[in-house]
Image (spheres, rainbow, N blue to C red):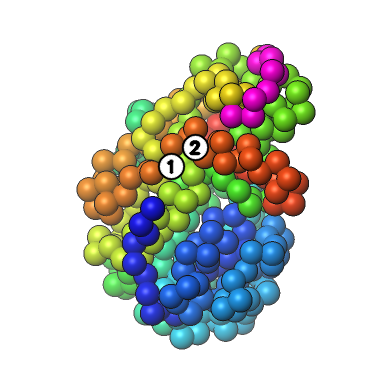
Amino acid sequence: MTEPAVRGRRILVTGGLGFVGSHLVDALAPENEVRILDDRSSGTLAHVPESATVIEGDVGDRATLERATHGVDLIFHEAAVVSVERSVEAPLETNRTNLAASLALLECARREDARVVVASSAAIYGHPAEVPVRETTPAAPTSPYGVQKLALDQYARLYHDLYGLETVALRYFNVYGPRQQGPYSGVISTFLEQARAGEPITIEGDGEQTRDFVHVADVVRANLLAATTDRVGEAYNVGTGRRLTIESLAETVRDATGSSSAVVHREPRPGDVRHSVADLSKSRRALGFDSQVELEEGLADLAGRAGEASADGVLERADRPSADG
């Protein structure tokens, strides 16, 4: 698929060794000077292009952040503690990375006059008041993680309005694909592991809850479009605009893996969001964004990566819209 052109730029990708960040670096490195800032807490050096520069350090350390941002003209801010569970356990600690460090990054970007594309989240909507979820749907986060992402989302737009900084906030829905690592396994990776092992595919609840699963390649496209759009100072949903029931997901995973696993049900998680799907009207109109990877195609690709999965780790982002984001 054709990617939007980002060429000849000096770019920083925070969290560039991680899930979305590493795919962004792959897309940017051939025609740009790419710098990565990452503490290696959930990433690996295995996928870093030779031309990229890695600064190993904490995005929350001001001196490191100033060194990483010096001279750049474009920043993709992916670094975060991407765990609703962790934010509930340690709200102060996660706030330091997800919000305080992000605000410091915006200040550094203001000094450099660098455009910033920030990774926001569907977690800001909590239990959405309407479906499909529009950018104007009232935000009602149900976790510290959601609050932190909402504050970053608003700070990014405020920095545009107040200081003229070019910013774009992208609200990711349920991102899936290769390379995501960490202990917080999502529903797609869990189903794949169960299906490959011939174990029952276990659904929490009746399976009629719906989600919007978007492939990481489409998320990369959204970021590149955000880097080149004239419609800055705005927030945009990044999903597919298509609902899928968890029951249908289980069946699709079973088909993709050729498994004979039974699909079974257990008690639902308390507070689980019933339905969530992105309204992409604004993203299509302003960014020219639409998803291109069909779920069946994406799952078939993941099903073929059985050996790679053990090395690359979790295959789905923990941003799923539920009780934990």
Please state the horizontal and vertical placement of residue 195, each as a whole percent of the image: 70, 26
Taking 113 as reference, is 275 above or below it?
above
**Residue at x 28% of width, y 54% of height:** 287
Callout 2: SS: helix
Residue 293 shows which numbered tag?
1
Label 2, on which residue? Answer: 297
Q: Is residue 154 magenta?
A: no
> Image check: 209 left or right of 15?
left
**Residue at x 72% of width, y 30% of height:** 196
Q: Give the position of the C terminus as an image quadrant.
A: top right
Quarter-wise, where is residue 203 in the image? Answer: top right
Callout 1: SS: loop
Please state the horizontal and vertical placement of residue 237, each as a whole percent of the image: 37, 45
Callout 2 amino acid: Glu
Please state the horizontal and vertical placement of residue 248, each as a whole percent of the image: 52, 21
**Residue at x 46% of width, y 46% of height:** 172
> Image check: 232 left or right of 110?
left
Point out the stretch of residues depicted in magenta.
256-264
Please state the horizontal and vertical placement of residue 280, each as a whole percent of the image: 31, 41
